[in-house]
Image: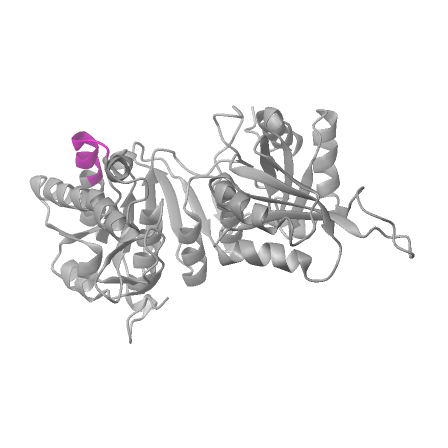
Amino acid sequence: MTLLPPGASRSARVALIVQKFGGTSVGSIDRIRGAAARALATQRAGNDVVVIVSAMAGETNRLLKLAADLSPMPDSREADALAATGEQVSAALTAIAIQAQGGKARSFLGHQIKILTDSAFMKARIKAIDAQRLHETLAEGTIAVVAGFQGVDDDGNITTLGRGGSDTSAVAIAAAIGAQCEIYTDVDGVYTTDPNICKTARKIARVSYEEMLELASLGAKVLQIRSVEVAMKYSVPVHVRSSFSDAPGTWVVGEEQSLESITVTGVALDKNEARVMLVGVDDRPGVVAQIFGALAAEGISVDMIIQSPSAHGSVTPDGARDKTDVTFTVGRADLPKARVLVEKLVADVGARSVRYDEDIVKVSIVGLGMRSHAGVAARMFQILAAERINIEAISTSEIKISCLVATKYAELAVRALHDGFGLGAKP
């Protein structure tokens, strides 16, 4: 993705702030007025301001339901053209609100900037941003209000960036003009875990890009994953704040600026997991590649993978078994498609049977400090064992450990890990 225009210098640009307002932050006329007032106050404090807006809360769902009422599988190009109108409404209303409060504002759609994307409708990726019109607008003392979530492909088609795509729009535009980015939402920052599950959850002052990326991928819904990827790639400082408070939020920054001495930063819960178990698969070279190659070809992302000797089949002369069990997890939304593919593969891979399970969740701990602290995994397993929670699968990276557990233990596991690692607010 090419963001900075030729000859642009980040150091040459000062007092540039991109403010993104989510659906709840522009969910009514009063809230749009509030967003406009905040943008104006920031400008009057001596900053150049670009505002990115989402559709009003619930609007994208309403639009897509209209399409679904007409067709069970609407054409993705037309679905994007339809869904993008929600942000167009918000952008125009926000510009009008700024003008009504004595400011200068101009609204822009994705193709007017222009935000160039690939042609993957409903999940497009940004290829380049031409920031020239933004710079011209800011030079006039005008606040630029940009419709988030959308762009345009090489053929002039309107595209959208997927759910939460306005976050990505905001961070990418901040990178393109050399600005810092403020994400205004209905929460006042990133917490050590979901406050609705654990009352002692604490707001984190600073979190690294890597930690935020893991937390977002593991179920934390504060920021879209791709927005964090862009922020990390282009070193864009991101401040997650509440639209309804002036209190500081959470800064998402580089590792050297975060509190890296903390072993565990947060606990995440992902309820979007489904498990597929292929029992008694032929234990020979190429079988696993065949299974996961078919899934990859259909764009199905696989999370945890476990391969273990099967109780079925025969024992070979060297004492091994000629059958293996292959278990993996996918997102629940992908399970119907995965089921169709797997059922076609059963005979080819010699599987005895296939089982599916949606009664599972993934609970994870994340922290940069895991790199240099031994025994974190053991401590996690001990905490879960003390609550008599059985671990059904495990996956790890340098800075996270994830465990698959039964759905009925989801909230208990989160609270136990949160308290066990001492993440709660101090009394």
Estimate the x, y position of residue 52 in percent, counting from the top left.
25, 48
Closer to us: 2 or 203 = 2
Magenta stretch prevailing secondary structure? helix
Task: Reply above or below: 25 against 176.
Answer: above
Task: Reply above or below: 410 against 308.
Answer: above
Residue at the front extreme? Answer: 347
How many marks are shown on the rendered structure? 0
> Looking at the image, which residue is at 54% across and 29% down?
425
Closer to us: 101 or 362 = 362
Task: Reply above or below: 231 against 64.
Answer: below
The quarter of the image holding the C terminus is: top right
Write down the region rendered in magenta: 27-35
> Looking at the image, which residue is at 68% across and 62% down?
286
Residue 314 in the figure: left or right of residue 93: right
> Is 32 one of the magenta-colored residues?
yes
The quarter of the image holding the N terminus is: bottom left
Estimate the x, y position of residue 331 in percent, counting from the top left.
51, 42
Can residue 415 be spotted in the picture? no
Task: Reply above or below: 216 against 62.
Answer: below
> Looking at the image, which residue is at 42% across and 60% down?
235
Residue 126 in the figure: left or right of residue 373: left
> Is 180 one of the magenta-colored residues?
no
Estimate the x, y position of residue 80 in percent, counting from the top left.
26, 50
Estimate the x, y position of residue 79 in percent, counting from the top left.
26, 47
